[in-house]
Amino acid sequence: MKREAQQQLLQRFEPILRFTRGEQFFPMRVEDYVAACSLWVQPPGTTPTCLVPQGQLTLEQLSDPAGESADGRLFLKFIEPLTAAELALYTLHKHPPKEESFRAGRGRLARVGYVSRFVDALFSITLLARGRVPGDRAAAASIAYQSIHKHHPCHSYYGRVHQENGWIVLQYWFFYAFNNWRSGFFGGNDHEGDWEMICVYLAQSANGDLRPEWVAYAAHDYAGDDLRRRWDDPEVAKVGEHPVINVAAGSHAGYFACGEYLTELQVRFLLPLARITDRLQAFWHKQLRQYRAEPATNGAQRASNIFRIPFVDYARGDGLSIGPGQPHPWTDPVLLEPAPPWVAHYRGLWGLYTQDPFAGEDAPAGPMYNRDGTVRRSWYDPVGWAGLDKVAPSSQALPLVQQQQAELAQRQSELQEQITLKHRELQALGLEVAALQGQRHLHKLFQRQRAYLTQQSRELGQLRAQAAADSALLEALGRYGASLHAGECGPARAHLQRPRQPTPPTELRFSRVAETWAALSVSVMLLGFVGLVLFARDYVLFGLVASITLFVVLEAGFRGSLIRFVTRTTICLAIAAALIIMYEFFWQLIIFGVIVAGAYILWDNLRELWT
């Protein structure tokens, strides 16, 4: 596809980005960012070395950086930390108008359980020990970005047109100078540089027109079916042919509906515990068929896991709006297909390398690469990244169904021939076995033929089962083909398993007492433990049990789940009591069980005899 056609196609479906009040960083040109950066290399076990000082770096130099080595980590450094005087001056003059200021949602910690809040507290403490972006860097980045925007007041995106398996994928890449999710919006991390992306999936209709069929918005490290929505899904807001993305404050994740999203951050060293907890929850709800809270009316929600760190993404859409017909339009797209040298050749990070073991505070790599230098799946396989590799474009669906029907019909015909031949062979074998039966001198031959007969009978049964399954599949394909021929596309949300949905307003109405308790509970628990150790050391165990019980009861009361808590506690106590009884009276229970079983067998046999 020619560059002019790519540009026209990208502009036809240009997205509209709606930000949250208080957002400080917006999509910008990478050359302006790179010009304000310095280039560094971090060899293992040594201090970083500056390769190109600030103010001298260009995209051409980034394409072929000097000092690159197999074991060195290249990274950019956008800004230097502010001095105490500069930070004080910035804080003094940072008073945005009320209509542009950010107000945190109520009850971030009140939305999750006590254990999750405790893990969240431990995660916050680890920021003191591990590599992180200093808090004054966010202020310095804001000052630097405002200076750049003052000289270049424009908003840019980078576009790519990728063709794969009948799909034409329009990728829109947005670059932000800084991610201030943690320092600005109580989120999980801060880092310099931020690449975000959305995809619009087009398919060619029968008359040759290109029509949008799916759209997917990148959000954190998620991938798969839950990322995408069908173009006619009511959740996909559009202005004409331009999809609307609600951008989360600070993190710049993309969401379909505006609102506040409870996001769980997965920490690597807690991953095994999180998986075990998921399995236990599944066993509790599926195998034991215990109580599960009713899913929200706006879609299924993923069950909260106590070993994932809860944060809120504020994607309210009440701030700045960028896009066609908005107060702030896009500049002409910069094409990334074919990939320019600064995309294809630079595998380093687009910001500060803090050496964070969790990687959350490290800057990301470019649109083509992951942090470790491997190619992003969203770059080399944007169709599979959104789970569309198993979905055919609508114009190809009916021909593929008809082709599958023809192949199945052919296979059915071949199966029927095999079944007929196998049945005749089986009948002949049956006659041979019947003839050999009772012939002592042919006993070994009889055993071989009877075993072979059993094997052939099993194979015939498998063939008939396969024929029955193919017949049912052929019938289903016929019904599905008829629906496609009638223009029906099926449910728009059938592919969704755990779609991300904003928290309903009813769940945001926490009382001030509940919010205060959520904020103080972890600290009160820790201080209470210290008090027990210092002043009541002989009663530490009893005090811990009593305090934990009190905290759990209060937690259940504040969260409106006291009845559920009592039910679960009763079930757990009943299971514990049953296990204790089994341990204490094991042999008595065995003897009692044998007596009961013998009595039942005797009664059943006598009843049959008398009848």
Image (cartoon, rainbow, N blue to C red):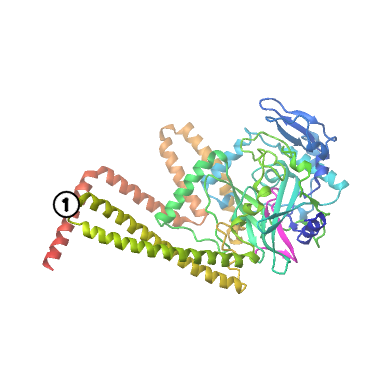
- Determine whether 465 is above or below 26 in the image: below
- Percent of width and height locating residue 504: 60, 60
Q: Residues within 10 Å of mark 1 (few under 14, many from 20)?
A: few
Camera sees residue 28 = yes
- Percent of width and height locating residue 378: 66, 49
Residue that mark 1 sits on: 440
The question of residue 397 being in magenta is answered with no
Q: Residue furthest bottom?
A: 486
Q: In which image quadrant can residue 438 be found? A: bottom left
Q: Dot 1: what SS?
A: helix
Q: Residue furthest left?
A: 610
Q: Residue furthest front?
A: 441
Mark 1: amino acid: Arg
- Percent of width and height locating residue 85: 80, 34
Instruction: Tell me the quadrant of the picture where the N terminus can be found.
Output: bottom right
- Determine whether 520 is above or below 599 in the image: above
Read off the magenta span.
235-255
